[in-house]
Image: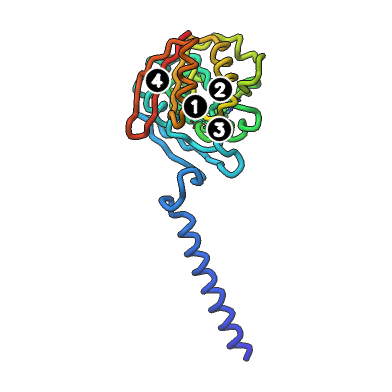
Amino acid sequence: MTVSLLIATVLFAMQDSVLQAESSLVLYDESAIPPHYKPFKHFTFGNHSVTIKQNWAEQGVAGVVWDAAVVLCEYIVANPTLFLNKKVLELGSGTGLSGICAYMEGSRVTLTDRPDSLDVLKENVELNTKQCSNKHIEKDALYKVASTNVPGCTPSNKLSSDSLSYIDCKVLDWAQRDNPLFDITWDVVIAADVIYIESSFEHLLQTMRTLKYSKMLFSCRLRYAKDHKFIRKARECFTINLILYDKSRDIHIYSFSK
Ligand SMILES: C[S@@+](CC[C@H](N)C(=O)[O-])C[C@H]1O[C@@H](n2cnc3c(N)ncnc32)[C@H](O)[C@@H]1O
């Protein structure tokens, strides 16, 4: 009696573990998971590998990678001189993909977003700069990396001996009228997929007008009439040129200048 009970228990446990293994297989079948629900996304841009941790459940639109960011990364690596040793600010960074890519091209990058979106941003910065950060972390900067003596640090092959590649995350809410980042003159401001909430358009335009910079690259998908309206409205205060249209992903990259 005891022996047959023991055998039944073992068989039940085996069946249970087979079921568990099967359900694990389903969970880890990457192709079955919609892009936004994938916990990690891996990208290769030129010589750079980037891994982005996504968190749609908790961070919503800020916690996932959008095509506009991917196309902007492709533009960044195709135009390295625009980014080498440049001071770059990113608006509405979300997971930070584009800014991280600019950092890997040798820029000093400040990624920005709303306060409640900074956690996912910082996690992704850490994930992609780990090799470099341990020895070089500084008090008032998340990561400041001396390029020459850090073997394995992605940007090192690009930078001259005295250059510093740098990446940091800061709050910049477009509704803010005051922010120390407005006092800095940036070489390049980048933004990907930031036009989607109509009520924020006026604030976004105001932020773009207030910032000081030489060049702005604005990557977007124009999904709705309101998005076209944003571009028309922006033309009243900026000179806007289309510099790239990716047809397969329906992404425009515009340059904005004041
Ligand atoms: C669609 S996501 C794009 C994220 C990322 N740039 C990308 O393309 O993968 C829009 C981003 O804009 C940010 N955002 C929205 N309203 C904002 C505001 N008022 N101030 C600052 N950032 C804002 C969101 O938090 C989010 O990260």
Q: Do tag 1 and tag 2 residues touch (Cβ < 8 Å)?
A: yes
SS category of the residue bearing label 1: helix
The answer to whether the beta carbon of the residue marked 3 is less than 8 Å from any atom of ligand 1 is no
Residue type pointed to by label 4: Lys
Q: Position of residue 121 (x, y in %)?
A: 57, 32
**Label 1 crowd (10 A; few <14 / some 14-19 / many >=20):** some
Q: Which residue is mark 2?
A: 201
Residue type pointed to by label 3: Glu
Residue visible at 43% across and 50% down in the picture: 30
Per the model, the C-alpha gap separating discs 4 and 2 is 37 Å
Q: Which mark is residue 245?
A: none
Residue visible at 43% across and 33% down in the picture: 67
In this view of the protein, which residue sits in the foreground, 120 or 224?
A: 224
Q: Which residue is mark 4?
A: 158
Q: Which residue is mark 3?
A: 126
Tell me: 21 left or right of 203: left
Per the model, the C-alpha gap separating discs 1 and 2 is 10 Å
SS category of the residue bearing label 2: helix
SS category of the residue bearing label 4: loop
122 up-or-down from 179: above or below: below
Q: Which residue is mark 1?
A: 226
Please report whichever mark, 4 or 1, sits nearer to the chain's N-terminal start.
4
Please report whichever mark, 1 or 3, sits nearer to the chain's N-terminal start.
3
Per the model, the C-alpha gap separating discs 1 and 3 is 36 Å
Please report whichever mark, 1 or 2, sits nearer to the chain's N-terminal start.
2
